[in-house]
Image (cartoon, helix red, strand yellow):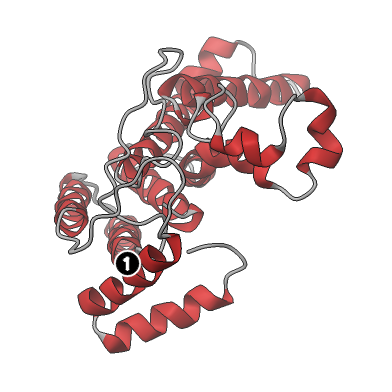
């Protein structure tokens, strides 16, 4: 799926975790959870850097293949490769925590890594990993293409997914559901802060409802987007994905989303 939907999904997971934490948590800690949710949601697509126009000029000497070949290949550093795995997310979450601890230790704000992890970074770490895992699950329902899915359980050489239930982008309906869930969680956070009462039941209901709605939308597309290798009818499926969104959302909402899409400098 597109990077915006992945990022908002991570942000939504962060908002759920914040609502699960005790109400007396510092504001900075809650903001850190939200931030790392966003980062975790976007993290797996770091392997798409090989599509950067300047990749060959700056990093080509280190690789035997061009950036486009790397992107479409099945090397561990290719798209949907190692970085699209739970292990990579856990390593990134741990290393980011260690770096933050090192900086705080430099300014004498922390004494031991264990204490820092227990009191500060633990919920941040889990949020990052959960957000990255959600990214992997979302990518499973996209086409197999040249990868055959995502290498979720790397270092095992097994690719999962590639079901082709949805197109790579133009999934406005899923984006709206995720965004709606995030806004509801945000409103609930504010309500709890004002009333000085705290319960995580409602945010979990929001999350479960959003998951059900997304599952229904994913499995009720009228067009099969599954393909392996290079797509021979790419443009046709691209157009059909937009028509399907117009059917799902109606002309008014679809036009609003299309205008929003056109203003973005990346595929959405």
The residue at 19%/54% (across/down) is 206
Relative depth, front residue between 189 and 6: 6
Return the residue nearer the eye: 132 or 243. 243
Q: Looking at the image, which residue sits at the far bottom?
A: 252
Rendered view: 89 above or below 157: below
Q: How far from the left and from the top, in percent, is residue 12?
A: 36, 51
The answer to whether residue 14 is seen in the rendering is: yes
Task: Find numbered disc 1 in the image and state the secondary structure of the residue it sits on.
Answer: helix
Query: Looking at the image, can residue 24 be seen?
Result: no
Q: Where is residue 162, by image quadrant?
A: top left
Q: Is residue 60 left or right of residue 147?
A: right
- Residue at the spot of label 1: 176
Residue 183, picture quadrant: bottom left
- Number of residues whose C-alpha sits closer than 10 Å to that of mark 1, classed few (under 14), some (14–19) or many (20 or more): some
108 relative to 188 in the view: left or right? right
- Residues 26 and 33: in front is 33
**Residue at coordinates 65% horizontally, 27% vertically from top-left?**
100
Q: Is the residue 155 above or below the residue 19 in the image? A: above
Pinpoint residue 201: horizontal percent, then vertical percent: 15, 46
Camera-side residue: 123 or 175?
175
Left or right of 100 on screen, residue 40:
left
Q: Among all residues in the image, which is located at the extreme front?
A: 232
Image coords of residue 264 (percent x, y): 57, 70
């Amino acid at each position: 799926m597109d990077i915006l939907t992945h990022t908002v999904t991570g942000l939504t997971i962060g908002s759920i975790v914040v609502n699960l934490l005790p109400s007396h948590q510092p504001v900075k800690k809650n903001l850190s959870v939200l931030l790392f949710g966003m980062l975790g949601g976007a993290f797996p697509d770091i392997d798409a850097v090989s599509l950067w126009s300047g990749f060959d000029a700056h990093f080509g000497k280190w690789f035997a293949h061009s950036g486009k070949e790397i992107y479409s290949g099945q090397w561990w550093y290719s798209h949907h490769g190692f970085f699209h795995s739970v292990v990579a997310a856990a390593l990134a979450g741990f290393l980011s925590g260690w770096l933050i601890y090192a900086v705080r230790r430099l300014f004498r704000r922390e004494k031991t890594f264990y204490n820092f992890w227990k009191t500060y970074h633990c919920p941040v770490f889990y949020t990052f990993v959960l957000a990255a895992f959600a990214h992997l699950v979302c990518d499973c329902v996209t086409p197999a293409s040249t990868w055959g899915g995502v290498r979720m359980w790397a270092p095992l050489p097994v690719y999962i997914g590639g079901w082709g239930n949805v197109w790579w982008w133009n999934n406005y309906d899923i984006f709206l559901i995720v965004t709606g869930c995030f806004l509801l969680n945000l409103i609930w956070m504010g309500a709890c802060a004002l009333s000085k009462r705290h319960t995580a039941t409602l945010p979990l209901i929001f999350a479960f409802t959003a998951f059900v709605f997304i599952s229904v939308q994913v499995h009720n597309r009228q067009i099969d987007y599954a393909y392996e290798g290079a797509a021979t009818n790419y443009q046709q499926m691209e157009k059909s994905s937009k028509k399907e969104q117009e059917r799902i959302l109606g002309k008014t909402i679809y036009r609003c989303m299309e205008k929003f899409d056109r203003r973005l400098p990346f595929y959405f």
